[in-house]
Image (cartoon, coloured by chain):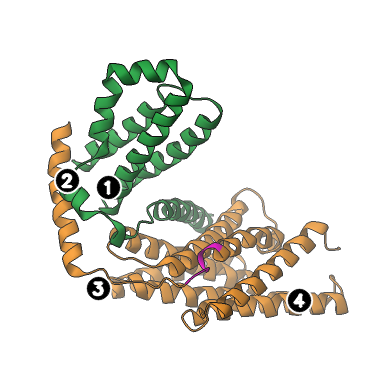
Chain colours: A orange, B green
Amino acid sequence: MKLTLSQYLISITSLAIYVYLLAVGRRRDLLGHFPFFYGFLLWCLVRDLARWGVLFYFGYSSPVYYHFYYTSGFVTPLAQILLLTEIYYQVKSSSDRLHWFFLLGFTGLMSWYSAAQHEREVYLVFNTIALYFQVLFCLLIHLQLHKNRRIYLGRNFSGILYGLSLMISLQACNYGLRLFHYVPHEYFALLLQAMGVIPFAMYVWYMDRLDLPRAIQPEIVDELAAIEANFRRAARSVR
Amino acid sequence: MIPILIIFASALLLLLLLLLNFLNRIEPQHVDLNFLRQKNLYLLHVLRILESPDYKYLSQNNKKYRDHLFLSYAGTLKQDMDELAALGLGFQASFYYCLFRFFYGVMILKNKFYSSVDDLRVLVGIELLMVKKAGT
């Protein structure tokens, strides 16, 4: 099996975006503010370059490339979870222990099912477990963000969250296609690479300048709540 | 099968929440508190204008003027919706806000090719729905 033109284009575009983002981050002093994000980008860059090296040296159908591809695939979900944890601590509420309990409990339950399904496919089991956790974690963060509109996450963290959520939800939709037909490894292969470019393009837009999360002054929060109550009263009279 | 179904449904829900949070991205510091305090919604003015004979005559007979009026009033309605969305009025109101933003984009795009007298009524209708839902 040979690489297609679309695979070459996707890889080259991704590499160009990683390099651009790292260069912009360095020039605008963003690296120190978002070490996990830029660490993740650096990892993606090194991983893709190493994959290209292994690909050219050993060939696409060699066992070395196969093992290298899937072994390197273990780090990416962990790095994404690390990023999500960083965002979660910006939006978390006081009842976070309960969240973790449900998150880990539900992921554990789902993982047990999927591990029983593909017990020999270590890579698939790991990615499935990670995907369950990531989707639920993203849902939790978005619900927190939606519930507490007084939190201003900042341009950069918002961008990271949007990009990651899009990446993860599309991965999960892709995985969900198993409902309709069964082809084990292809779920985490070409289509994911193509969809992965969109979130990185979003990062180009959101990581252009520094805009950190800010605590909104309590008096403004109180005033907004009072205005909201007044508005609800007034809106009833529009009926 | 059930875990896959759950993850698929969760992913779709995540996409929906992502869209809601993406469209509701308002910087609370930029909200005009005085505007909200007085509940001075542009909607009320636009409703009055829509019924006025001058508006009806001008928008029916002069395309250039109709486009100008549409763009100005649609902009003020969008400002209303942005301010209301910043209050965080719940999921239902967020849904209407997303709907408004979608139709706002569609109407602006449509207006570049073909404009109609009723374009503004669509946006007004959605804002009215949101205001009514917010009161429940």
Secondary structure predominantly adopted by residues drawn in magenta: loop
Q: Residues within 10 Å of mark 2 (few under 14, many from 20)?
A: many
Q: Secondary structure at mark 3?
A: loop
The circle on residue A94 is: 3
Q: Nearer the viewer, residue B112 or A54?
A: B112
**Residue hosting label 4:** A51
**Are tags 4 and 3 found on a single chain?**
yes
Amino acid type, residue under disc 2 in the picture: Phe
How far apart are the alpha carbons under marks 1 and 3?
27 Å
Q: Earlier in the sequence, mark 2 or mark 3?
A: 3
User: Residue B72 at what x, y percent from top left?
Assistant: 38, 36
Instruction: In the rendered view, tell whether residue A46 sits above or below residue A84.
Output: below
Ranked by sequence position, the earlier of labels 2 and 4 is 4
Front tag of 1 and 4: 1
Of residue A21 and residue B111, the one placed in the foreground of this image is: B111
Q: Which residues are magenta?
A: A205-209
Residue assigned mark 1:
B84
